[in-house]
Amino acid sequence: MTTKIHATCDALGNPTGFHLTPGQAHDLQGADTLLPGLIDRIKAFLADKAYDAARRVLDVLEKAHVEAVIPPKRSRTDKRVYDKELYKERALIENFFAKLKQYRAIATRYDKRAIAFLGAIHLAASVIWLN
């Protein structure tokens, strides 16, 4: 059994939200859940190529006047421009996941039920935030 952790972080790399999906699910399922709660509070949305979806992400961000800092997929015919310098700040979420996976129970998923696993993620994230 695999599980994908979808997370959001603020500009300082502190976690602000989590969502779990089955391991085979696409990353956009996490975006569908987490993005509506962020739209009112953000000015830019930094994400990797998996989030380069017009209807589900880009149109929603454009409608809310949020800058989409998402590199275009290689297969996209009309290449969008994005702020490459600002995209480098996406390392904050990658660093958060590296810190989160230092907790053995998270890295190996000891918990059988998703609710218990999510609770362990919240606990580890709060310790990371306090450090």
Image (cartoon, rainbow, N blue to C red):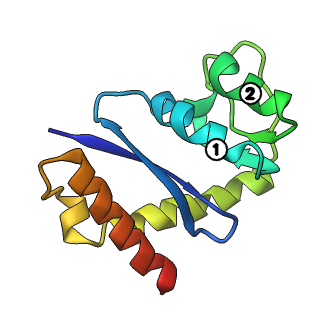
At 68% from the left edge and 58% from the top edge, which residue is drawn?
88
At 70% from the left edge and 65% from the top edge, which residue is drawn?
11
Quarter of the figure with the N terminus: top left
- Foreground residue, 115 or 28? 115
- Disc 1 crowd rating (10 Å Cα; few below 14, some 14-19, many 20+) is few
At 12% from the left edge and 58% from the top edge, which residue is drawn?
110
- Foreground residue, 42 or 90? 42
Give the image location of residue 103, x and y in percent. Answer: 26, 72
Give the image location of residue 59, x and y in percent. Answer: 76, 23
Could you tell which of marks 1 and 2 lies nearer the N-terminus? 1
Let me know if residue 45 appears in the view: yes
At 18% from the left edge and 55% from the top edge, which residue is drawn?
109
Say which mark, if any, is on residue 18: none
Q: Quadrant of residue 74?
A: top right
Residue type at mark 2 is: Val
Q: Is residue 35 left or right of residue 6?
A: right
- Disc 2 crowd rating (10 Å Cα; few below 14, some 14-19, many 20+) is some
Let me know if residue 46 appears in the view: no
Say which mark, if any, is on residue 60: 2
Q: Quadrant of residue 2?
A: top left
Q: Is residue 51 left or right of residue 99?
A: right
* Mark 1 → mark 2, Cα distance in angstroms: 12 Å
Q: Quadrant of residue 93?
A: bottom right
Q: Is residue 30 left or right of residue 53?
A: left
Residue bearing mark 1: 37
* Viewer-side label of 1, 2: 1
Helix, strand or loop at disc 2?
Answer: helix
Helix, strand or loop at disc 1?
Answer: helix
